[in-house]
Amino acid sequence: MTRAYRSPSFWAALLIVAALFAAPAEAEHRIGTLDTVGSDTMAGLMLRWGERLARRHPGMRVQLQASGSASAPTALTAGTTLVGPMSRPMTEAEHQAFVARYGYPPREVVVARDALVVVVHRHNPLSSLSRQQLDAVFSETYRCGAEGGLRRWAALGLEVPSGRIVLHGRNAVSGTHDLFRREALCGGRFRPSVNEHPGSAAVVAAVAADPQAIGYAGLNHLMPSVRPIPLRDAEGVQRAPEPSAVRRGDYPLARDLRLYVNLPPGESLPAAEQAFIELVLSAEGQAIVEELGFVSLPGAVLSRQRRRLGLEAE
């Protein structure tokens, strides 16, 4: 039976991550309310961006609901938000549901780079994993080419830790869960014994507390209490989750973090949403990306997206 851990912070994130950031101001300073629904991986980013925006525009109200990437397409299609943060691409079904409702596609805005990192206890001597080994540890389908499962640490050539491998991962509403399933398991199924958690911080905490544990989490959640494991490519070259490798795309579990936006062709966004995206795609917004442990975007990528959205160049 898959088990799910519910930390106190999960319930806070599920309801409202951020509400009113600033005290009421004069009416002429108000630019409206920003409501977003989506990725919990991006909750910290959205919160910091929202705080910075509220300082720029006193009296602005910012509400961020971080209930998982799967909630963003639903909210966008229902019209309850114009901006949906996601740590994975929309599926074809999600995209088509939006088009069926509005007659045009959602705008995709890449806002940062991230990576999924395989982590073990800090005293675990495991040096690296191949794609086949990673799949054999976490899946029950072995679609990446393994001949069978790896269930005990001895099967990976380790004497310490001994015993069975204890697995930790994200829950199914998470974009992190979906990306790891597609890329690390070659689209296969997770083992039922994976302990599911609502956030990467909970995964890292569980692995840090158990020498027999292994898990996967977002790059920005790394702590000294766990060790990131390099992944070997088909030629046997180890690829560590270094920011430079994530930015270049050399690390196999790198990903884009996105905002999906409901913006009709030929129209402009409301003031609150436009101000938010302008901040995110600015040098100031990308400095926040780096501060929170994600990987910022190259200037050329930022400029290209600003032009595509009709925003002024920095």
Image: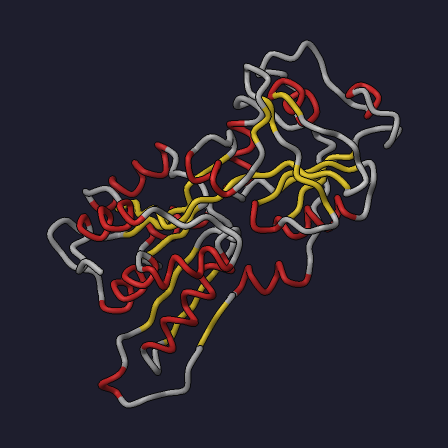
Report whether 305 appears left or right of 189. Answer: left
Residue 127 % position (x, y): 71, 29
User: What's the residue at 53%, 44% (across, down)?
Assistant: 174
User: What's the residue at 54%, 40% (across, down)?
Assistant: 242
- Which quadrant: the C terminus? bottom left
Residue 226 picture quarter: top right
Is 40 placed above or below 155 here? below
Q: How is the image coloured?
A: secondary structure
Residue 98 % position (x, y): 29, 43
User: What's the residue at 71%, 50% (across, down)?
Assistant: 224
Q: In front here: 3 or 123?
A: 123
- Which quadrant: the N terminus? top right
Residue 119 % position (x, y): 68, 39
Report whether 270 appears left or right of 220. Answer: left
Which residue is most to the bottom?
A: 26
Is 135 placed above or below 209 here? above
Q: Is there any visible trace of residue 163 in the rendered image?
A: yes
Residue 221 % position (x, y): 61, 51
Residue 33 picture quarter: bottom left
